[in-house]
Image (cartoon, grey):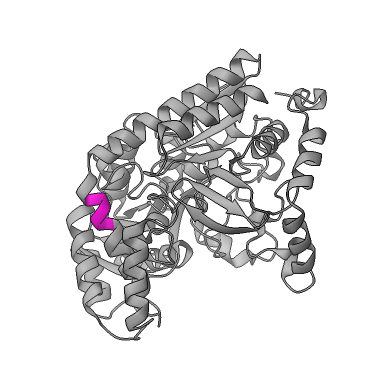
Amino acid sequence: MTSLLHSHDVFSPAKREASLRQKTPGSLARYERAQRSLAGGVSSGLRRDARPYPLYFQSGAGSQIEDVDGNRYRDFTLAWGPLTLGHAPARVANAVAEQAARAFTFGAQHDLEIEVAERLTGIIPCAGLVSFANSGTEIVQVALRLARAATGRAKFIKFEGHYHGWADSVLLSYHPAVSQSDGSGEMPAMPVGTGEVVSHSAVIAEWNNRSSVERAFAENPGEISALICEPILCNSGCIYPDEGFLEFLLEITARAGALLIFDEVITGFRVRLGGAQELFGVTPDLATYAKAVGAGTPLSVLAGKHEFMDLIATGRVVHAGTLNGNPLCLAAANAALEELQAGAPGIYTRLESLGERLRLGLERILRDRGLPAVTNGCGAVFQVSFSDRRPRTYRDTLAADRRLYSDFALALLDEGILTLPDGRWYLSTAHTDADVDATLEGATRI
């Protein structure tokens, strides 16, 4: 697919950018100031390329967010996903405020550790035991360390396009271009600054390609400690596994004596209360969580079967961190999980229905304009792409017209609809039919 469409100014990007600049002078002034002291003017590189520039926000409530210039937006970014209950849900906000009045952190044990751990082991299918940390990147490293210890092997398999945090060992082949193929058909691209030695432990396979996985095991006999994947490829197109593919991964890892790790940082507590494990009925050996588990607070979780988690329990595998299980984040998690448990499964049925109406509505509106639009995913998290085919692998996503989507997102922003730059859309339990109606109306106007 070419990028000819955006050259015709389908979504009037120049006009939209001028309009937004008029509405957001406070954000521009802050961004210019930030660049004098903050590297790149942002705290995460993924925010730097926002159009017309990174916006600055001051408050959020439910499904909406307000910037420093007083503009309100219907928010489908949800802080890159974690706000499953929307902005500042009352139960969570109250729980955090009450805990903050008592203590921020102890560096020692407290009752919330037990309460949240008991909730999680009752919810997550693979959770015989859990451990806490602070970010998705961090908890993935714990999972891989545990797999190496359990198997005595150094290598692991990951898939093209799957994101498991920004640590050197897992950032390989996250969003490689076709030109970055190594000549063998694989795409093991490493970011600048990542040492070559790191690539020796990661073996890259292609999502939804059984022969690729079989080859990865065959070429590294007795060397693979684990296979890690997003059970739905949310970070690159919201691509579902083919029917039977997760079952295949479970079978081949068991046969090879390796562990199967689900990275449920996005799918956990979002697609179902029990995450993708509940949705697909496939139980891995280990699973990682962050984002939604703490309702947007910095909390992550490793859940796993007793036989593996006992390595942490007995101290054979080191797991440390001063802020692990801190009471502020666990107060948020306890309140959020309580609300999700009380409302399940109904809240997930509603979330799925609402999101599907939005997803299919956007696809219809764009196609009615003669644009080759496709959507992937489910109600709670889905992808909008300008492409003439629905992706099944990461490589298929490379055919999408990313510039055209960027113009689309810019026009939506001018209509008061905030979306992520990569085409991903998130819904929360706070979103309503009115939010969907207004968003579809806005998409029709642009």
| Image quarter hosting the C terminus | top right
Front one among 218 and 109: 109
Q: Is residue 277 left or right of residue 187?
A: left
Examine the residues drawn in magenta and state their main secondary structure: helix
Furthest toward the front, the residue is: 70
Front one among 30 and 246: 30
Q: Percent position (x, y) of residue 102? A: 32, 82
Q: Is residue 326 visible?
A: no
- The verdict on residue 272 being magenta is no
Q: Quadrant of residue 242?
A: top left
Q: Percent position (x, y) of residue 37? A: 75, 74
Q: Is residue 112 above or below residue 206?
A: below
Front one among 335 and 403: 335
Q: How many marks?
A: 0
Q: Is residue 236 visible?
A: yes
- Could you tell me which residue is drawn at 34 percent across and 41 percent down? 271
| Image quarter hosting the N terminus | top right
Q: Percent position (x, y) of residue 20? A: 74, 43
Q: Percent position (x, y) of residue 177? A: 68, 42
Q: Quadrant of residue 326?
A: bottom left
Q: Is residue 148 above or below residue 81?
A: below
Magenta range: 337-341
Front one among 26 and 398: 26
- Could you tell me which residue is drawn at 37 percent across and 58 percent down? 289
Q: Is residue 226 above or below residue 414?
A: below
- Could you tell me which residue is drawn at 58 percent across and 44 percent down? 73
Q: Quadrant of residue 232?
A: top left
